Image (cartoon, helix red, strand yellow):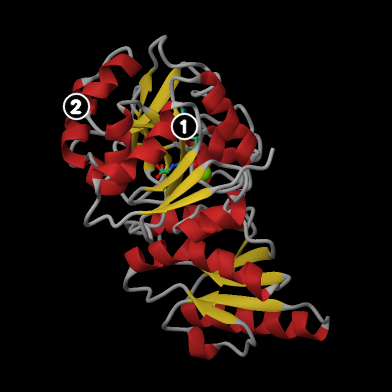
Amino acid sequence: MRKNTLVIKLDKENIKLDELKIPSEILKSGGLVAFPTETVYGLGANALDEDAVKSIFVAKGRPSDNPLIVHISDISQLENLVKCISESAKKLMEKFWPGPLTLLFEKSDLVPLVTSGGLDTIAVRMPDNEVALSIIKQTGLPIAAPSANLSGRPSPTSASHVLEDLDGKIDAVVDGGETSVGLESTVLDLTSDTPLILRPGSVTREQLLEVLKEVSYDSALESSDKRSVPKSPGQKYRHYSPKAKMEIFLGKREDVVDKINEELKKYDSQGIKTAVLSSDETLDLYNARYKLSMGSEKELSKVASNLFHLLREFDKLDVDIILSEGVEEVGIGKAIMNRLKKAAGGNVTYV
Ligand code: TXA
Ligand code: MG
């Protein structure tokens, strides 16, 4: 059903109480409101209202077995949502909340199974963005919010990305400007013996090890074996995808540049429209008509905040194939490579 999506502009430096009325009333009455967080825009609904949560899945075209993250504005909201809060969880929340770390807990009976995608665990985080926090606070509710994109598309880092995907399908979008981190939160499972990173994000394993004795990555994240099932259902789908096919080339910088130039020539001779995704350092080395830079390889946090916007830019260029470099998998580089590989459907060549 087509709706009129209302756009509500908010200045995150100067949020007025009456501006929060409309979005919070929509959420309280079971509607859908997209809003910015520090990572990406989320598509919010009352996490405890089954019908509201179901309509998130419909608007996004999201598989119903892919659970949602519940967003809170105050730690006191957590008690009703989960069975118990471990000492490790307390320490992590103290250090990283509000912020881009999502924690898994055993869920309480209050949380409907639609919200948790049928699982008995629930993912929770407290976003570090004043607009998000004020809206959640104003509703007094836990707010379920997946990234506010159509399922499979790159996550939105601005209100215009949200409208590209969901205009007419949701009640409102709160435009609070561009998001700062640009990649979704780190998802950490504390319900297994060893804490497991199910989705890498800007809170890195190294940072988590400052609080926890051990932290591993879900082994299925790294595996090329199609039979290994990731513990985070969202990781099993092709995701973040631009419309073009994407190929990633990894190796020594000179070799990668040579290989991509070679591929460009090959595709050109076949009349296939190509584009290159490079770094600032290598942009000039490509003989390509269409080329975009992720940013400097020395500033990976900027690369992270540019990435999803760039993937959407390629759609506008209407190219058939994107030939992409990778980044070094250190710090947030791990999360960047996770998203790039997903966008490429695992199509990686080592040169
Ligand atoms: O930064 C973020 O996390 C953004 C903003 C809006 O907060 N949200 C976000 O939500 O990225 P979404 O739904 O696009 O991704 C949630 C991820 C999915 O991969 C999902 O499978 C996983 O978290 N997840 C959620 N609950 C889970 C659970 N109980 N067990 C395992 N994985 C879970
Ligand atoms: Mg998502």
Say which element carries label 2: helix
Q: Is residue 72 visible?
A: no
Find residue 94 and name its label: none
Q: Amino acid at mark 1?
A: Ala
> Residue at 39% across / 16% down in the picture?
107
**From the image, which quarter does the N terminus lie in?**
top right
Q: Position of residue 48 (x, y in %)?
A: 44, 20
As drawn, the residue found furthest toward the front would be: 18
Q: Which residue is mark 1?
A: 45
As drawn, 108 above or below 149: above
Residue 93 vertical placement versus 279 (above, below): above
Q: Nearer the viewer, residue 212 or 10?
A: 10
| x 68%, y 61%: residue | 243
The quadrant the C terminus occupies is bottom right
| Label annotation for residue 90 | 2
Q: Residue furthest right?
A: 270
The spot of residue 325 in percent (x, y) is 53, 71
The image position of residue 207, as x and y in percent, is 23, 46
Most foreground residue, 327 or 277: 277
Which residue: 32% across, 71% down?
Answer: 299
**Label 2 CA crowd tier, 10 Å (few <14, some 14–19, many 20+):** few
Closer to the eye: label 2 or 1:
1
The residue under the point 53% across, 27% down is: 53
Residue type at tag 2: Lys
Task: Work out whether 66 lies above or below 285.
Answer: above
Residue 177 found in image quarter: bottom left
Q: What is the distance, in whole Å, between disc 2 and disc 1 at their CAs?
A: 26 Å
Q: Position of residue 46 (x, y in %)?
A: 44, 27
Badge 1 density bin: few <14, some 14–19, many ≥20, Cα 10 Å: many
Q: Is residue 299 visible?
A: yes
- Name the side, left or right, on which 105 lies relative to 318: left
